[in-house]
Image (spheres, helix red, strand yellow):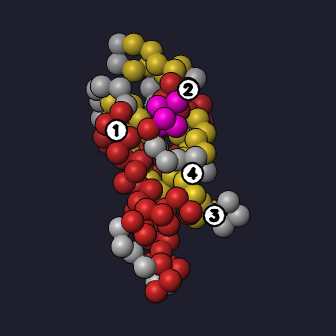
Amino acid sequence: MYVVFGDRVIDSKEIVDIILKNSCFDNVEDISSRSKREDIVAINLSISAKTLNEILEEDGYELENEELEDILSEYMDIADTMAMELEEVMPQESICMAYSYRYDEVEESIKTIFVLSHEELGNRKLKDVLTRMLNLV
């Protein structure tokens, strides 16, 4: 989907490619059309629990001594952080927000919504779109 980005147009597929090349997210789905806006890129991201376990173990976290709720909370925090770090590789003049919303037991992965827009839109409007996208998924 083509998205208005300031005074130019970008393809949301380019953003998907950037995410795939620069992150550990293994399932990246463009859901920009669901936002019903021409100035928002929305991506549904997924990262496997196996990848998150490796990250936690590298940081010295002992998984076998923790409760499932604590581990899931750590998973969510890491996924949020990794999604927000993508802002560094996004087009200049962009603002991003991300929120991890669910642990998928079947896929054993964390689901995260990532939204991006031109900075002219503003953080308040981007947060409104993120909330709406979370209600859709």
Give the residue number, with chain letter if any, for mark 3.
Answer: 108
* Nearer-N-terminus badge (1/3): 1
Q: Identify residue type, mark 2.
A: Lys
Q: Distance between the residues labelled 1 and 4?
A: 17 Å
Give the residue number, with chain letter if any, for mark 4.
Answer: 46
Q: Identify residue type, mark 1.
A: Glu
Residue 86 appears left or right of 107: left
Q: What element carries label 4?
A: strand
**Frontmost residue, 127 versus 17:** 17
Q: Residue 13 carries which label?
A: 2
* Nearer-N-terminus badge (4/2): 2
Q: How far apart are marks 4 and 2 (CA)?
A: 16 Å
**Frontmost residue, 41 versus 74:** 74
Please provide the residue range marked out in magenta.
Answer: 17-21
* Nearer-N-terminus badge (1/4): 4
Image quadrant occupied by the N terminus: top right
Q: How far apart are marks 1 and 3 (CA)?
A: 26 Å
The residue under the point 28% across, 26% down is: 93
Q: Would you say the residues marked 1 and 4 are in contact, meaning their CB atoms lie under 8 Å apart?
A: no
Q: Distance between the residues labelled 2 and 1?
A: 16 Å
Q: How crowded is mark 1: few (under 14 residues within 10 Å), some or many (20 or more)?
A: some
Q: Would you say the residues marked 3 and 4 are in contact, meaning their CB atoms lie under 8 Å apart?
A: no
Residue 17 place in picture, x, y as percent: 52, 30
Q: Residues within 10 Å of mark 3 (few under 14, many from 20)?
A: few
Q: How far apart are marks 3 and 4 (CA)?
A: 10 Å
Q: What element carries label 2?
A: helix
Q: Identify residue type, mark 3.
A: Glu
Residue 7 position (above or below residue 121): above
Residue 106 place in picture, x, y as percent: 71, 64
Residue 43 place in picture, x, y as percent: 53, 39
Residue 25 makes an appearance in the image: yes
Q: Is mark 1 on a helix, strand or loop?
A: helix
